[in-house]
Image: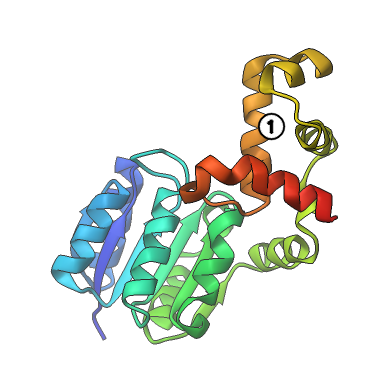
Amino acid sequence: MPLRVTVAEDAVLLREGLVGLLQRFGHQVTAAVGDADALVAAVEAARPDLVVTDVRMPPTETDDGLRAAVRLRAEHPRLPVVVLSQYVEQSYAARLLDSGRGEGVGYLLKERVGAVAEFMATLERVAAGGTVVDPEVIQQLVRLRQDPLERLSAREREVLALMAQGRSNANLAADLFISDAAVNKHIGNIFSKLDLPVDVDGHRRVLAVLRFLRS
């Protein structure tokens, strides 16, 4: 049965490739967009049978596509969504898979999509209410849910320990003999790995320290 599909992918060649593939298999593409805001608008306008979205896209070039998918699932729990990614985005992947009782959702790693017919069958299965998750994604989420601090590298744990001592970023850089940019990168990784969403940015440093102290 033909599906009405909204595609969100900021890489033009990949986006056009997905559009062509869907059309070749008899499906209708209601919109093909390159950023998260346009994805939300396109879904509200067309109410498609399925959304296929990348994780990393504008406006911030981080996890905007996945966050948009989580938002859409919250507003439309029965909207089937397939996320295509080059990696497992820890902060929102679990929230997406938990949404809508886990029905009509897929999370696939791009590099592990090996056959076109199998990929199209996956889309149709999700559109019908099924759940398809790459085994590598499942392994990582299970591992990460056991203890959030286990996600941190040795250096990130060291940075977090110094943060718990009240050190500023400048102090951290001096103590660890690394650049300010490296400190910011480590702290960003800590926030992401501890599932501290962007919308609590002003409190993430405190929340990260509290997670460390509770451990």
Q: Residue furthest left?
A: 45
Colour convention of the picture: rainbow
Q: Quadrant of the N terminus?
A: bottom left
How far across and down, in percent of the image, does residue 30 sit?
Answer: 17, 65
| Residue 170 at x, y percent in the picture | 69, 16
Q: Where is the C terminus found, in terms of image quarters?
A: bottom right
Q: Position of residue 176 (x, y in %)?
A: 82, 19
Quadrant in the picture for residue 25 = bottom left
* Residue designated by label 1: 186
134 horizontally vs 37: left or right: right
Residue 46 appears anywhere in the view: yes
Q: Position of residue 53 (x, y in %)?
A: 38, 58
Residue sitting at 81 percent across and 31 percent down?
Answer: 162
Q: Is residue 156 above or below residue 132?
A: above
In the drawing, does residue 116 fall left or right of residue 155?
left
SS assignment at label 1: helix
Determine the image quadrant of residue 74.
bottom left
Residue that appears at 30% across and 47% down: 35
Q: Amino acid at mark 1?
A: His
Residue closest to the far front: 166
Q: Between 102 and 33, which is closer to the camera in this rendering?
A: 102
Side of 117 where 168 appears, left or right = right
Front-lying residue, 55 or 13: 55
170 is higher (above) or lower (below) than 150: above
Q: Which residue is rendered at x = 75% and y = 56% of the image?
A: 148
User: Would you say residue 113 is visible in this rendering?
Assistant: no
